[in-house]
Image: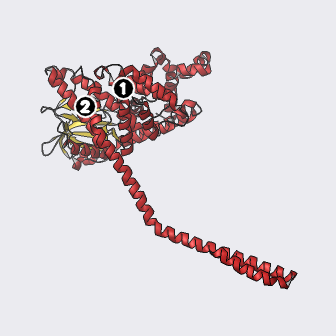
Amino acid sequence: MSRLLRLWQVVAYLFFCSYEILERYLTPVGVFFLSFLFFPYRELLSYPPPRRLKIAFERLGGAYVKIGQLLSTRVDILPAEFVRELESLQDRVPPQPLKELLRHYPALENAFLSIDEEPIGSGSVAQVHRAVLKDGREVALKIIRPKAEELIKRDVSILRTLVFLISFIPAVKEFRVPQIVSEFERMLLNELELTTEAAYMELFRKFSRKEPGLYVPEVIWEFTASRYLTTEFVKGEKLSEKLFEPYIPKERERLARKFVHIVNRTVFELGVFHGDLHPGNIFLLEDGRFAFVDFGIVGRLSPDTLREFFFFSIGVMNRDPDMIVSALKRIGAVSDKVNENLLKREILIFLDKYYNRPLSQIDAERLFYEELSVARRFRIVLPEELVTLMKTIAHTESIARIIYPDFHLPPVLKPYLMKLTPGMVASSVKRVALRMALDYGELLSQLPSYVKNVGREEAEKQKKVSSTFWGAALLGFSIVLTLSPKLLLVYLPGLYFFKRAAEK
């Protein structure tokens, strides 16, 4: 498909997805006549707007399916009903023949005893095949489609063009849409670099030694490169309600708590979290451990961002709008134009809806969506990794309810956060003290040269003053000599005492 035809197709879908908004600016009659330019896609109007957006991404395929999935994490930008619709967006495309794939990766052709022709997963970027190594080990082989990078760059380029064309719309600037497109491009291209995914798997695997409830498949590095990844094949059951039917309620509750504990530990203790946690990426092993797979999307928090998210969470749990807004300000999410008093009032009203009921009756996922709808009203745009993190934590509740339907997150999360508070505060103070010590150390190391420079500047200053003084004295001497030589008897002693007084 030519770039021009693809651009027309994308504009057509964008036009019908924003049809109601355009009617406000161009009048219903104007938009109706304009729609004839994109007549083949007019049937989209028979769907409600959220479903329309999902269908558009699915039909555009390629990078747009991934962009739609990434948008489902941006609850600070899209209304909740759009996000929920995009969460069901499936990246399923017909698989590319295995022989065709292997032709692009000759190193793989003789590396395995066998590779299943039919993939166990097929998306727009990669597909996964079950395989057997020559030593008999069962593995999962993930292979990037050969033209994936080219298609992603083309689709993102078209998206950038469209964003530039609509950059005059205030909301595009307020929500920093160009920067978000850049974030999407970075994340999409990162998914193509499978050695990065492998490195994160190793990081989680090391952490699993400290967390007995977590299992992460081993990376087979000798058959892993930037465009293909080989890992141990996980033999377990994917999470589903049917899987837990034989378990008694107490055992189901214990497993749900264990799962949430694992996610919380990866976030607050490791500072890295699985950014695409859904039942298809979680397996229950025979020994009761949870296995996580598919680390294509991983969130990485800097210590400062993690600290602010921790204090933000404590603020929400303790119904403290000052702590919430302070944390948002420190991460740069609240602009100077925001009325802070009004924002705090709205947060307090919002929290009152939930905190007049027991923790066991609070729906964390609903709380999350409504919380970010308040942020959207005040044009607060959170860092991408922070939104992904907030959504991951909120979704742990919905996943835990697959295990135990009566599970509620807040009664588990609040004690855990309070338990971590002393350590988090101590760590924060330690980091600030270390930063100050380094700053003072740098200052002390520069002090000798600073003193030397000050001395040199002072000497130069004295030299300039001295030159100016003697120049003025010589001029005065000439004037006095011209007017009356007798005045030199007064002028010369006066000049001497003035010079001594100046030196003191």
Say which residue label 1 marks: 87
Q: Position of residue 252 (x, y in %)?
A: 17, 24
Q: Residue at x 51, y 30 (%)?
A: 341
Q: Amino acid at mark 2?
A: Val
Q: CA distance from mark 2 to mark 1?
A: 20 Å
Q: Position of residue 343 (x, y in %)?
A: 49, 29
Say which element carries label 1.
helix
Say which element carries label 2.
helix
Q: Residue at x 59, y 19 (%)?
A: 24
Hey, which quadrant is residue 93 in on the image? top left
Q: Closer to the N terminus: mark 2 or mark 1?
A: 1
| Scheme by which the image is coloured | secondary structure
Given contact means CB atoms under 8 Å apart, are the residues at marks 2 and 1 in contact?
no
Say which residue label 2 marks: 260
Q: Position of residue 378 (x, y in %)?
A: 50, 29
Q: Is residue 92 above or below residue 440?
A: above
> Viewed as shown, does residue 439 lie left or right of 15?
left
Residue 56 visible in the picture: no
- Mark 2 surroundings: few (<14), some (14-19) or many (≥20) residues within 10 A: some
Q: Position of residue 295 (x, y in %)?
A: 29, 39
- Mark 1 surroundings: few (<14), some (14-19) or many (≥20) residues within 10 A: some
Q: Amino acid at mark 1?
A: Glu
Q: Is residue 431 above or below residue 63?
A: below
Please state which of the two labelled residues, at mark 2 or mark 1, is closer to the viewer: 2
> Viewed as shown, does residue 479 lie left or right of 441?
right
**Dividing the image into 4 quarters, which one contains the C terminus?**
bottom right
